[in-house]
Image: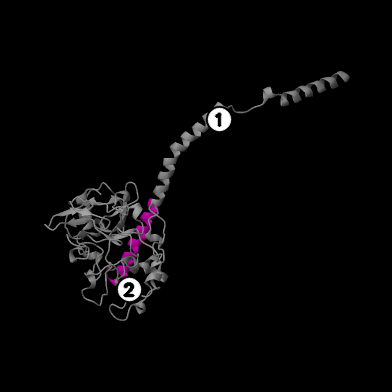
Amino acid sequence: MHVRMCSDRLSNARLMHQKVSPRHQKGFTLVELLVVIAIIGVLIGLLLPAVQAAREAARRSQCSNNLKQIGLAIHNFQDTFGRLPPGARDGDHRVPDALTACCNSRTRYGWSWLYHILPFMEQKPVYDMATDQHDPPTPGSGQNSREDDVARQAIITYYCPSRRFPEPHGSGRFYRADYAGNAGERGPGGIRETASGGLRGVIVQTDRAKRRLELITDGTSNTLMVAEKALNPKAFGSEGGDNERWNNAGWDEDIIRYGAGRLSNGTEYGLPPIPDIKAPHDPGSGWTTITDLGGRTWGQWHPFFGAAHPAGMNACLADGSVRLIPFTIDAEVFRRLSLIDDGQSISGF
């Protein structure tokens, strides 16, 4: 018995010695740690682009959904009123020659198409913030008294998440929009001339004409209705089609763009969409410009559709379908896609 107890004590002592002995402690060497860190770094480097691509795909999908809602709202507007929403206008509709003014309407009647579709976007409370009762009683007496209140409402559906989150700009803290109606062809003169009033587009300058989907002779599935507008990242909230209120910009690049151009000699050409980083802007030392395929030079106020997405822009066709149109689209194809009445076939987009 005594021998057995001594043997057990000896075994326990050996076990205790093994537990505390430095020779048997487990751990990582510095080299092993560095190798693990390097492997983790490589994996992160490989996975990060995939994660970023997945996030952009989700943002692009949300942008597409925004345009889908806008397209449905425009269709519902026509179902209710028998015509497409008016685009916008400048001045006061009670003054015959005020269409050449700049850059807002004195009455709610001339506010943008973005405002007029609000009741069909589940935004009727915002729409009702201004009424005709708030319009000035006499021509030239001022603007709608509730215009600023409406402009301070952020309509999140009017913002592309790949570009920016809703943020007010200027001392008035007014919001903007990332989507523009298709006004068709940009004429050789100013944007407020008759030829540039949307007569060949889906969205028409208020009081120039009225449009119905059934009157689009090229077919609603072959005609652009609304799409993202090109906007340089350094021009948010400033000149170049982002300086006016979303609800009342007048007939302006803030709320309409063109996919076709026409020179004074009658030459017609396409204005394909461009990435945001290629859109003109003012860096503070003068105007930057861009020359289109027709040889015309544009400063910050330019006609281009475009997007912050890497491959192309989302667009809603007149039939309500939404497509991703690549920046590489053929200029002539995009010209035809932007016009309602050119009578030419379209393929390859």
The residue that disc 1 covers is: 33
Main SS, magenta region, reads helix
Q: Nearer the viewer, residue 146 or 344?
A: 146
Residue 126, x across and y down, in percent: 41, 69
- The residue that disc 2 covers is 108
Return the x and y of residue 68 as percentages of the image width and height: 35, 58
Q: Position of residue 220 (x, y in %)?
A: 25, 59
| Identity, as a three-letter code, of the amino acid under mark 2 | Arg
Q: Residue furthest front?
A: 285
In this view, 50 is above or below 220 = above
Magenta segment includes 189: no
- Callout 2: SS: helix
Kindly tell me whether residue 277 is visible in this rendering: yes
**Neighbour tally class for label 1: few under 14, some 14-19, many 20 plus, Cα within 10 Å:** few
- Who comes first in sequence, dot 1 or dot 2? 1
Q: Is residue 179 left or right of residue 189?
A: right
Q: In the image, which residues are magenta? A: 60-83
Vertical placement of 18 versus 134: above or below?
above
Residue 77, magenta (yes or no): yes
Q: How many marks?
A: 2
Amino acid at dot 1: Leu
List the single residue furthest toward the bottom.
137
Q: Quadrant of residue 146?
A: bottom left
Is there a contact, CB below 8 Å, between mark 1 and mark 2?
no
Q: Residue furthest right?
A: 2
Q: Residue at x 40, y 44 (%)?
A: 53
Find the distance from the CA under tag 1 to the CA under tag 2. Answer: 68 Å
Q: Quadrant of the N terminus?
A: top right
